Image: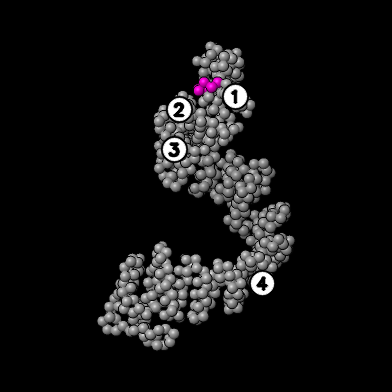
Amino acid sequence: MALTLVLNFIFHSTSYAQRNKKVSTAIPITGIKSREAEYLFIEGEKYFILDDTTKANFYFNRVLEMNPRNATIHYKIGEILSKSKDITDLYKSKTYAEEAINLDKKNKYFYLLATDISTTLNQYDKVAGTLELMLKEVPDSEDYLFELATAYSKSNKYEAAIETLNRAENYFGINEISSLKKQEIYFQMGKSNEAVFEAEKLMRAFPLEERFVINLANALIVVSKPNEAIELINKNLATNPDWIESKITLSDIYHSNGGIAESQQLQIQIFDDYFVDLQTKIEILQGYVSQFKKNNLTENNPDLLTFPESLLNKLKAQYPNQSEVYIEGGNLYFNFNLLKEAEREYLKAIDLKSTQFSLWSNLLSIEETMNQFDSLLIHTDHALEFHPNQPILYYYNGYGHFGKKEYEQAIQSLVMAKNISFDNPELVSKVDCLLGECYFENKEFEKSNIAFEESLSFNPNNDYVLNKYSLYLSLRKEKLSIAEEMAKRALDLQPTNVHYLETYALVLFNLEKYMEAKSYIEMALRLENQSPILYEHYGDILFMLNEQDNALIQWKKARTLPNFSKSLDKKITNRKIN
């Protein structure tokens, strides 16, 4: 039925044109040609629906050849071309849409196509002109006043945008869309008083709408009138004590203006209110995590944890079986680098059947940091049941096997991590570094070198990789000049890193640069005096400098510390390097 009406409109447009004198008279199509045109149009519509725009365009152009003054056919061709990503086609589609409007100024959809195309081309002046014409020619099109205002605004014609929104307000009455848009434009124009006036007008028109009170309060904050904003919200809360969003806004205002106690008191009220949903409370807690993370406030301010931790405890009491509560608790402690506490919260969330990926990611990061290799293997196996396509989980599994000296299994997991890390070169670099260590321990030295070099190809200045690669080359006494260069680069990047100082000293030792090696091992010992390996290396260097008595002193110091090497006793007994 609908198609019949469209076809009648297309192929019998003469009578329509006669009733609308502004439209040029089209030559009517009759008889065989009419049936042919109808067939061609139906074919065009069919291919248009099937998204075969090439064939659709072909058939519609055939109809256009038979009836070049038909607005609808111009519209259909313009619609097809408007879907193209070719800029030339877009300009052509605009021409067709404009011709459709010229032929029929009363069809709203012709204007809308033209404005869509002009918007795509960022021609907002043209959008505005088209919409103005539509508002003039098409009855009951006032809904598009808001789009017209947006077009003027994007053309930086702010006064015209305001005037358009006033037209909308005169037609629809005071309304949220007009008012909020006017506020935005007034602020862009630097007319803050007018923006506040609009916010006040909207609130007075709808005094029982909480969001409009909050909107006015926010406008007052923008113009640096926090006390007025506080007074406004408090006044409304006196008669509407269940307005939770107002309490949250007021809490934020207090906090931003130094009223920490007042802010916290409001948050306590919110958390103690059983009618406030869990998500609202969690979002408040998340605000603390985001704030601390953004401002790096956690490391030197442990007291900052006290209040959000008290809110967390309230949530636990109210929702003891909601995993989301423990996830946020884990995030809070994780942000303060309280890893044991964070681990406890995350494990509780897992017990409550949470499968959230971020939870697993943070928990495994903690276990990696704490070298909890057994836990890593257990939890990566569990996490992979729910997230089998997450490469970081295979990385952590590989790290767990590496820590347990299960190098073949580690390599398998790491290769899998690398193979599915399609768009994460940083993770691939990290995987390659650990692969380099695994291959070294597995005595696959050439593969180890390749893995380290691939890791460095992503970031040539990754000090950790530079140090590890140079260390392993030095232990094998291979490519020592390259090892020296990489160890020095790592140390330049982190000059007080004890491990880097130790590696550089070892490389120099193997290059028989004993005086230089002595200087760097002494730097390391000034930073760390409880390392048996440092004292042992120091003794080795002194021995090579013919300071055998001093070497013996350093070996004996190393022997008094935990985890000394098995070779020490022989060195001490024989008073020489084995």
Q: Callout 3, which amino acid? A: Glu
Between marks 3 and 1 in the image, the one whose residue lies nearer the viewer: 1
Magenta stretch encompasses residue 346: no
Q: Which residue is mark 1?
A: 519
Label 1 – label 4 distance at C-alpha: 75 Å
For residue 24, above or below residue 481: below
Residue linked to disc 3: 454
Question: Compared with residue 91, is residue 315 higher up or lower down, i.e. above or below?
Answer: above
Which numbered marker is on residue 251?
Answer: none
* Amino acid type for the residue under numbered disc 1: Ser
Residue type at mark 4: give it: Lys
Residue under pointer 2: 479
Q: Which residue in the structure is indicated by mark 4?
A: 201
- Closer to the camera, 118 or 467? 118
Instruction: Characterize the local packing of mark 4: few (<14), some (14-19) or many (20 or more) Cα atoms within 10 angstroms.
Output: some
Q: Position of residue 132 (x, y in %)?
A: 52, 76
Q: Secondary structure at mark 1?
A: helix
Seen from the viewer's position, the closer of residues 531 and 513 is: 513
Distance from disc 3 to disc 1, alpha carbons, whole Å, reads 32 Å
Mark 2 Cα-neighbour bin, 10 Å: few <14, some 14–19, many ≥20: few
Q: Residues within 10 Å of mark 3 (few under 14, many from 20)?
A: some
**Stretch in magenta:** 509-514
